[in-house]
Amino acid sequence: MPVEEGGIGFRSLHDVAKALFSKLWWNFRTKPSLWSSFVCQKYCKKLNSVIVPWKRGSHIWRKMLECRDLIEHQIFWQIKKGSSLFWFENWTGLGALYFLVPQDFGIDETVQNVHDVTLDGEWDVDRLFELLLEDLPVHILEKIKPPSPQQVLDMPCWMLETRGYFSVKSASDYTRRRDEPRTAYRMICVKGLPFKIAFFMWKVWKAKLPLDDFLKMVGYCMPSKCWCCVQPDEESLQHLFFRSETARTTWKYFLSRAGIVVEGLTLHQAITKCWTANVCLRLKPVM
């Protein structure tokens, strides 16, 4: 994940794979080909690909359907001659109408394409109000121009890009895992600080260092002592960086000069106090 969300700025293979499967779904939905026809005939049968459930099939088809549930409503079909599927494609900007009407409302399957609800080059108002709930026809009549008689198929647009072209980057940004941005993570990775220091600090903050207490937590039980102390205690994150004699001396030396009292603080509180200390600009990098 990004630095401000608690990661170290790298994308996981899981998120990259999800973006690439999203590209496969985009190609399947928007680019007629021998491959897309084969996949449709094999897995969709008489159902539309937008609503077909996964029952069996290849690993690739299953992953494509998982991405479908995330990105299908981001494919907007720009009306030209009205070739878009009336119920199953997002030509209104609100999503597929199939998912917008209540399940008990029922859909008229005789209406296939958008141009089926036009009359003499204009919207068939009575037909729209007959097929849909009241707010949907109003949106269509106010926001969408009726199809024109030109011989141009409706065009798919990727709503996450201003130019309408699909990109793996925008799909990855949209589908990746997210966490709440936090100030602490932004403070760890600062300009001018060597990455190895920032990465070490990140591991300290998230308690990911391979110390004895961490190894014990993941199932490796062993005798433990801190080799840095005259009177050793168990090697742990709190002891090594905060409670040992050397750590206490170091914290007291720097925090006292910033007017911060160490007593009664935890390790994370002491670190936060350093970051937010009101000191001169020359001391800010040190803190």
Image (tube, helix red, strand yellow):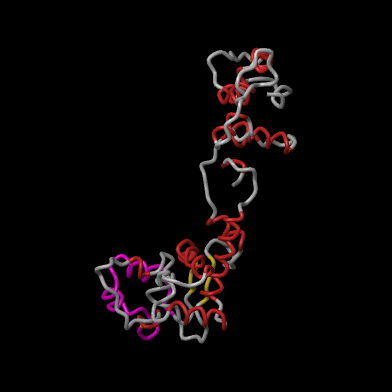
In the image, residue 40 sits, relative to residue 136, either above or below, namely: below
Q: Residue 271's quadrant in the figure?
A: top right
Instruction: Assign the C terminus to one quadrant of the image.
Output: top right
- Nearer to the camera, 143 or 55: 55
Residue furthest left as drawn: 104
Q: In the rendered view, does 30 fall on the left or right side of 241?
A: left
Does 131 appear in magenta?
Answer: yes
In the image, residue 114 sits, relative to residue 25, either above or below, namely: below
Which residues are drawn in magenta? 119-147
Q: Residue at x 28, y 66 (%)?
A: 102
Does 57 appear in magenta?
Answer: no
Q: In the rendered view, does 233 fall on the left or right side of 77?
A: right
x and y percentages locating residue 162 in the rendered image: 57, 62
Q: Residue 15's quadrant in the figure?
A: bottom right
x and y percentages locating residue 261 in the rendered image: 58, 13
x and y percentages locating residue 205 in the rendered image: 60, 32
In the image, residue 167 sits, relative to residue 273, either above or below, namely: below
Q: In the rendered view, does 40 fall on the left or right side of 235?
A: left
x and y percentages locating residue 72 in the rendered image: 47, 66
